[in-house]
Image: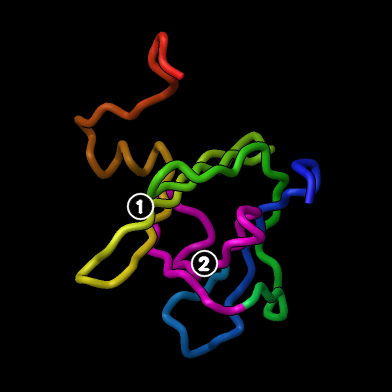
Amino acid sequence: MTWMEARFRVARNPDDASRLPYLVWLPLEGGVVLKAREPWPQAARVFCAEDGGAWTETAGLVDEAAVLLCRRRGIAIDLVLDRPQLARSQFIFTTARGRPAVWWQTPKTVQAANPGARVPRGRAPGGC
């Protein structure tokens, strides 16, 4: 897949018993599939869990957008979409209560969660 074909997708989770009603597909490393509580983090960070299954849109596609950037940086995956709003987000892979967890956040939700914190906006001068 070329960068021109890279698409971000959100679909409804076909598993009705799941407490995470959405599936998120990231065009990275052959495709990363996550279960998510919300289709986009707007008011707070969104809890996600890794889904060992394959991507499916059988329950219906909710969102789709072209991807400008999707790269892994340590425990994070940075995502930049080609659209005017709801375009930048980050997935943080960590542990919660001893279990693997993923938090999906935007710069706005990070600022709302911790109002006094400085949110990096770009590279430091002279950095690589």
Position of 124 with respect to 10 (left or right) is left
At numbered mark 2, what does the secondary structure look like: helix, strand or loop? strand
- Residue 34: x and y, percent? 52, 67
Task: Check residue 29 for magenta coloring.
Answer: yes
Q: Quadrant of residue 115?
A: top left
The spot of residue 43 in percent (x, y) is 38, 50
Contact check, label 1 and label 2, Cβ < 8 Å? no
| Residue underneath mark 1 | 44
Number of residues whose C-alpha sits closer than 10 Å to that of mark 2, classed few (under 14), some (14–19) or many (20 or more) = many
Q: Residue furthest bottom?
A: 17
* Tag 2 residue: 34
Q: Position of residue 108 (x, y in %)?
A: 39, 38
Badge 1, how many Cα within 10 Å: few under 14, some, many 20+?
A: some
Is 9 inside the magenta-drawn segment? no
Q: Which residue is at a point 22% across and 71% down the rendered structure image?
A: 98
Secondary structure beneath disc 1?
A: loop
Image vertical order of residue 117 relative to residue 60, above or below: above
**Which image quadrant for residue 56?**
bottom right
In the depicted structure, whether residue 12 falls above or below residue 111: below
The kind of residue on which mark 2 rests is Leu
Which of the colour schemes (rainbow, by chain, secondary structure, one colour) is used? rainbow
Magenta span: 24-53
